[in-house]
Image (cartoon, rainbow, N blue to C red):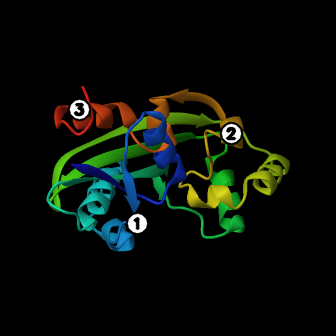
Amino acid sequence: MSLILASNSQIRRTMLEQAGVGFNVRSPDFDEAAVKAGPDLGGEQLARRLAESKAASIAADDCDWVIGSDSTVTVNGQRYSKPRDREEAATHLRAFSGQIMELASAVALANRGRIDWSYAETARLKVRPLSEEFIQSYLNQEWPEVGYCVGVFRMEGRGVALFERVEGSHFTILGMPLLPLLGALRERGIIAS
């Protein structure tokens, strides 16, 4: 039995490696824009649908299990995507300044192309007031890496300086609810219990 991570995210790979989980990596193959353009879903619902779509998109052998994971960010009722460029990243940070960011992360397991299990949860992060000077300095140091992050931050990097307070699982904030995933992997005999 083998495990495949359907993700291009380095932090998701690192989380699994640090937990001692053996896996291979394949890029998911599905139309993310089509999923986002579908029915208007809440943050957790959309993150779960994206995670499930990633997991189901990998054509795997019968004995393979596939992990899909994704995150969404909502601020003041508006959903944000990854910034297209540095200027859009700055625009996002200006909009986040002084606000509550709701970061929903989801993870799913598929076997034989069918979703067997999925889970989503939301963390709430209070963004401190950000000056224009800080935003530009931050992007000078963190761009382009944060361009791959829906919230324009890496909590494992300088992104921690954006926040006054965080409520929720550290792993969810990093982009994958790891503890529930590890439990699901143990329940299915994919990793030792």
Provide the residue designation for mark 2.
162
Q: Amino acid at mark 1?
A: Ser
Q: Residue at x 19, y 63 (%)?
A: 61
Q: Position of residue 44 (x, y in %)?
A: 33, 46
Considering the numbered disc 1 on the image, is that residue within a helix, a strand or a loop? loop
Residue 101, which numbered label? Answer: none
Provide the residue designation for mark 3.
186
Q: Position of residue 149 (x, y in %)?
A: 56, 55
Q: Quadrant of residue 191?
A: top left
Q: Is residue 131 left or right of residue 179?
A: right
Label 3 vs 1, first from the N-terminus: 1
Label 3 vs 2, first from the N-terminus: 2
**161 and 182: which one is in front?**
182
Neighbourhood count class around disc 1 (C-alpha, 10 Å): few under 14, some 14–19, many 20 upward: some
Q: Are marks 1 and 2 in contact (CB under 8 Å)?
A: no
Q: Amino acid at mark 2?
A: Leu
Quadrant of image for the C terminus: top left
Provide the residue designation for mark 1.
27
Q: Amino acid at mark 3?
A: Arg
Give the vertical position of 172 relative to 78 (above or below).
Answer: above
Q: Quadrant of residue 24?
A: bottom left
Q: Tell me the distance, in whole angstroms, between the alpha carbons under discs 3 and 1.
A: 24 Å
Q: Residue at x 43, y 52 (%)?
A: 72
Q: Residue at x 28, y 57 (%)?
A: 49
Q: Position of residue 166 (x, y in %)?
A: 55, 29
For the question of whether residue 51 can be seen, the reply is yes
**116 and 42: which one is in front?**
116
**9 and 45: which one is in front?**
9
Q: Nearer the viewer, mark 3 or mark 2?
A: 3
Q: Position of residue 41 (x, y in %)?
A: 30, 56
Label 1 vs 2, first from the N-terminus: 1
Neighbourhood count class around disc 3 (C-alpha, 10 Å): few under 14, some 14–19, many 20 upward: few
